[in-house]
Image (cartoon, rainbow, N blue to C red):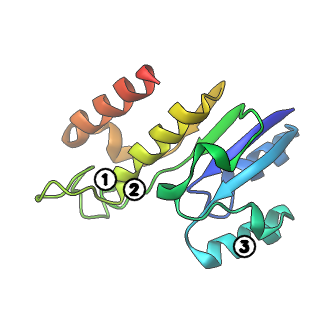
Amino acid sequence: MLNVLSLFSGIGAFEKAFDNLGIEYNLLAYCEIDKYASKSYSIIHNVPEEKNLRDVTKVDILDIDEPVDLITYGFPCQDISNAGKQKGFTDENGERTRSGLFFEALRIIDDYKPKFAIAENVKALVSKKFAEEFKTVLESLDEV
């Protein structure tokens, strides 16, 4: 059975896929900042909202004391998506965008050192416009 940590959980699409495929897993925690998505997640997956770590920027290595086998995450795509602002990971002032929260997922992967990590994002991430961001994603994941 996989010990799973879900980041940017939304309503738990990864976990629903595991359920649909009959993959047994133990949800250690999920992380969703939106209170409505968190409530929905809790109801859909029949888990207490106390399992929600909430703000991904505040997730700490001490939050989970069991080994993490798998981290799932779909970091925010608003600044990469064709329908979004297309600023990438940083804006014109060098400030991290919502899509820049990828680096928080990376930090958590580095902290917990799971056997596996599954990321989901949008098609535009592999486009020519975001070639540097995609290169950063691949190199960063390779490092951790």
- Name the residue rendered at 33%, 37% in the picture: 126
Query: In the figure, 39 relative to 76: above or below?
Result: below
Do labels 1 and 2 touch, CB within 8 Å?
yes
**Marked residue nearer the N-terminal end (3 or 2):** 3
Q: CA distance from mark 3 to mark 2?
A: 21 Å
Give the residue type that dot 2 points to. Cys
Across and down, in percent, residue 30 comes to 68, 56
Give the residue type that dot 1 points to. Ile
Q: Which residue is mark 3?
A: 40
Across and down, in percent, residue 49 comes to 76, 69
- Name the image quarter holding residue 76: bottom left
Across and down, in percent, residue 108 comes to 53, 41
**View extreme (bottom): residue:** 36
**Marked residue nearer the N-terminal end (3 or 1):** 3
Instruction: Give left or right: position of 33 versus 57.
Output: right
Callout 2: SS = loop
Q: Which mark is residue 80?
A: 1
Give the residue type that dot 3 points to. Ser
Callout 3: SS = helix
- Name the residue rendered at 56%, 73% in the picture: 34
Q: Residues within 10 Å of mark 2 (few under 14, many from 20)?
A: many
- Name the residue rendered at 27%, 38% in the picture: 133
Instruction: Give left or right: position of 3 versus 35.
Output: right
